[in-house]
Image (cartoon, rainbow, N blue to C red):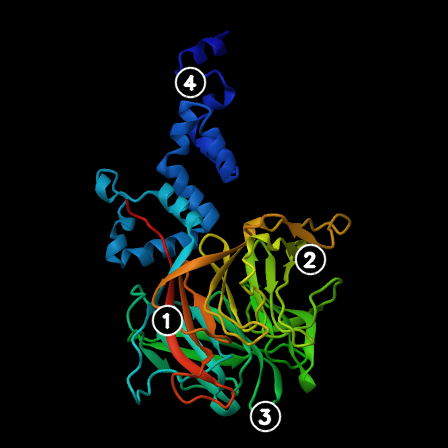
């Protein structure tokens, strides 16, 4: 009776959920998927008010986008006059009030990018990386780090370049060459970010020799705030993957790196999968091979990208018969049980005139949990300049129980693949370039690659190596 009387004094409905304290209700809402939250918002006035609150949407942004990503996104936008209100959370200034709900909705409505061209280096300028392809480019410790690659005449490069980014994402970068011990010259190697470190593996030199050494790199800042970079070879003991180049790699957490495939000795394409596990001190690493069936076919020039929650996506590449592939595989490394699962997707949503299979592309995890595919070439060696997004939320999670895991997962969502529009500067079509994303996931840096040779003298094949750096910005409209 007392409970009934007390509930009668509230303006809310008699539903038990409306009588829960607001802090507890927020906690419950944060456990629900976004569709359920929208559904609850239509049930009563109280839930409608709570699901519209800035506090809830701030937590949802950090939950679904990641706290570090949101913080970096705010910092990056604060440097742009068009987005200067994003830092202003003063509730008394409604004109400049930043809406967390707007940010969330804008992120998941994104369907386009804008490309920005950096100023080209002057003729004869030495403090700028030379033209190259099959190099590495990483964003670590607020810096771009570029190493190696191949250049005209099939020659390899062994130089390391560093450029500090800061908060001005559209200014001309100041590159500086690193003068220190570095890995030997090579192209087709991989280099992945692992916390504040880079981990480099393998590659091919201009004599055709394959490598299987592992290096760690780190950015340091001197007392005068200048940037320095150093490499050191990692001790991995007696066991290591066979030498290779043109393989794929990614970091799956702060202590493990995954590699797959590539071109091994005698030009043989490989299909093996290896994991490098680091010691707590990062002074030592141990390689383990993953043996599982089914598994992706041997290939080179493909990509591996960690999409979070211990899941990794493999896409594309060139197979044993030199065919260009368009298959998607997922490796789940949760709970120590490792198994490759092919992801079978519906092609109905992809225009027939578009060749989605490709090799020499880049695949980067960007803001909103999307896998952004850029460039590459098809089976006719036609280079691409298109942006495709693989919606990883459409990929079903696999159960790690061996008895229940199916051998394949079919995605019925025909919007799993979606082509994004591009505006602004139009870069040349390219393949075997490299791309990396900043901490916000909104700004993608692209450097080099192979392009058509019609603008200047080219290789006999009609190709030329490029030295262009441009910025790809995911389009967000954060102001009313």
Q: Residue at x 41, y 78 (%)?
A: 229
Question: Which is nearer the N-term, disc 4 or disc 1?
Answer: 4
What residue does disc 4 label?
12
**Residue furthest to the top:** 1
Question: Which disc number belongs to residue 207?
Answer: 3
- Against 265, residue 279 (above or below) is above
Corner quadrant of residue 145: bottom left
The answer to whether residue 362 is left or right of residue 85 is right
Question: Which is nearer the N-term, disc 2 or disc 1?
Answer: 2
Question: Which is nearer the N-term, disc 2 or disc 3?
Answer: 3
What residue does disc 2 label?
341
The answer to whether residue 165 is left or right of residue 239 is left
What residue does disc 1 label?
470
Q: Nearer the viewer, residue 384 or 337?
A: 384
Q: Which mark is nearer the camera, 4 or 2?
A: 2
Q: Nearer the viewer, residue 392 or 50?
A: 392
Q: Nearer the viewer, residue 205 or 334?
A: 205
Q: Are marks 2 and 3 in contact (CB under 8 Å)?
A: no
Cα distance in 3D space between marks 4 and 3 = 77 Å
Question: Which is nearer the N-term, disc 4 or disc 3?
Answer: 4
Cα distance in 3D space between marks 3 and 1 = 31 Å
């Amino acid at each position: 009776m007392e409970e009934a009387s007390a509930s009668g004094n509230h303006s809310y409905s008699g539903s038990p959920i409306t009588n829960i304290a607001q802090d507890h209700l927020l906690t419950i809402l944060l456990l629900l998927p976004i569709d359920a939250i929208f559904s609850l918002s239509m049930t009563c006035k109280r839930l409608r008010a709570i699901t519209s609150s800035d506090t809830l949407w701030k937590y949802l942004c950090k939950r679904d986008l990641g706290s570090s990503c949101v913080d970096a996104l705010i910092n990056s936008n604060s440097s742009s006059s068009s987005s200067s209100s994003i830092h202003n959370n003063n509730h008394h200034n409604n004109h400049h009030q930043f809406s967390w709900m707007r940010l969330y909705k804008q992120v998941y409505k994104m369907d386009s990018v804008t490309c920005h061209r950096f100023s080209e280096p002057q003729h004869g300028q030495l403090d700028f990386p030379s033209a190259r392809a099959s190099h590495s480019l990483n964003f670590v410790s607020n810096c771009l780090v570029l190493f190696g690659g191949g250049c005209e005449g099939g020659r390899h490069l062994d130089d390391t370049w560093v450029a500090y980014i800061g908060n001005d994402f559209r200014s001309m970068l100041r590159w500086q060459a690193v003068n220190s011990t570095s890995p030997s010259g090579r192209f087709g190697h991989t280099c992945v970010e692992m916390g504040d470190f880079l981990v480099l593996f393998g590659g091919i030199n201009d004599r055709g020799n394959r490598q299987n050494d592992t290096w760690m790199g780190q950015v340091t800042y001197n007392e005068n705030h200048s940037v320095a970079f150093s490499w050191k070879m990692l001790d991995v003991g007696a066991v290591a993957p066979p030498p290779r180049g043109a393989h794929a790699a990614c970091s799956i957490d702060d202590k493990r790196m995954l590699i797959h495939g590539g071109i091994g000795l005698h030009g043989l394409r490989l299909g093996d999968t290896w994991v490098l596990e680091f010691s707590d001190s990062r002074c030592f690493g141990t390689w383990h091979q993953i043996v599982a069936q089914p598994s992706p076919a041997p290939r080179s020039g493909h990509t591996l990208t960690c999409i979070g929650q211990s899941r990794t996506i493999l896409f594309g590449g060139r197979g044993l018969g030199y065919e260009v592939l368009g298959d998607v595989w997922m490796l789940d490394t949760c709970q120590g049980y490792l198994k490759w699962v092919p992801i079978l997707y519906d092609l109905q949503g992809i225009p027939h005139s578009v060749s989605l299979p490709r090799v020499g592309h880049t695949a980067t995890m960007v803001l909103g949990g999307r896998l952004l595919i850029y460039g590459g070439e098809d089976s006719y060696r036609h280079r691409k300049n298109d942006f495709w997004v693989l919606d990883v939320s459409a990929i079903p999670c696999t159960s790690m129980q061996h008895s229940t895991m199916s051998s394949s997962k079919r995605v019925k969502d025909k919007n799993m693949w979606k082509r994004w529009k591009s505006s602004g500067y139009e870069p040349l079509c390219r393949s075997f370039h490299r791309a990396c994303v900043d901490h916000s996931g909104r700004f993608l840096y692209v450097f080099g690659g192979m392009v058509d040779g019609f603008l200047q003298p080219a290789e006999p094949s009609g190709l030329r190596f490029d030295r262009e750096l441009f910025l790809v910005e995911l389009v967000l409209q954060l102001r009313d």
